[in-house]
Amino acid sequence: MPDFVGGIMEKVQQITEMGKSNKDLQGLINVSEVFYVWDIMVMKFDILTTVMLMENFIKDKDLKFIAAQLSKGLITGIEDMEQVMKDHSIPFPPRPPVSSNTTAVLEDITDQFIYGGFYESIQSFFPVLSGGFMNSTSPKVRNAIKSHLLLTIELQELIVEYGKLKGFLNPPPVYRA
């Protein structure tokens, strides 16, 4: 039922937007939504830059897979947010470098250290995405943020399970009554 309602509202918004200029489309979203869209994009760029840099130091093939999934999810999210930004003439933040290759080998940058950075990066998305979703009144923006939230939940599940498997996740103490 919820997807049905969201789909209807998105169709209504598409009809409302037909034939409107970018300037007219700006009036269909509020300033809070513009902030969240821009902030989500900045966070995605920052985390993508970190993931690309850390990929140079990963030794574990499973962690390389995790990093590839993170990159893929971030790039998908960036492309989605870019479309929302174009549609409403929202200025773009500076883009990250296309790649980040390095020849340096640093022993202190371990797979566990990299995992911790990935784990914290994904967790940092939840407050921004949930805040953006709760403050959005535009069906188009709300659905875009919702899809990012669901993707982030899937990535978090992947990262948590990997961390448990490798012993990288600091488990909370067991509760015994």
Image (cartoon, helix red, strand yellow):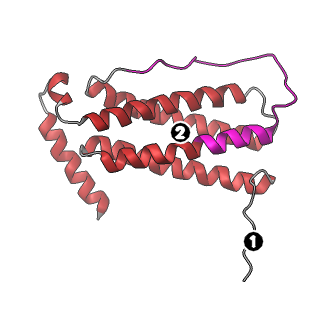
Give the prevailing secondary structure in the magenta stretch.
loop
Disc 1 is placed on an element classified as loop
Estimate the spatial distance between the alpha carbons at disc 1 and disc 2, rounded to whole Å.
33 Å
Disc 2 is placed on an element classified as helix
Residue type, numbered disc 2: Gly
- Residue occupying image coordinates x 69% and y 56%: 161
What stretch of residues is rendered in magenta? 92-121
Residue 97 rendering spot, x and y as whole percentages: 58, 17
- Residue occupying image coordinates x 34% and y 20%: 91
Residue 62 rendering spot, x and y as whole percentages: 75, 44
Magenta segment includes 163? no
- Residue occupying image coordinates x 58% and y 48%: 155
Q: Which mark is residue 73?
A: 2
The image quarter containing residue 27 is top left
Is label 1 in contact with label 2 (beta carbons under 8 Å)?
no
| 51 sits to left or right of 80 | right
| Residue that lies at the very extreme toward the front in this rendered image | 177
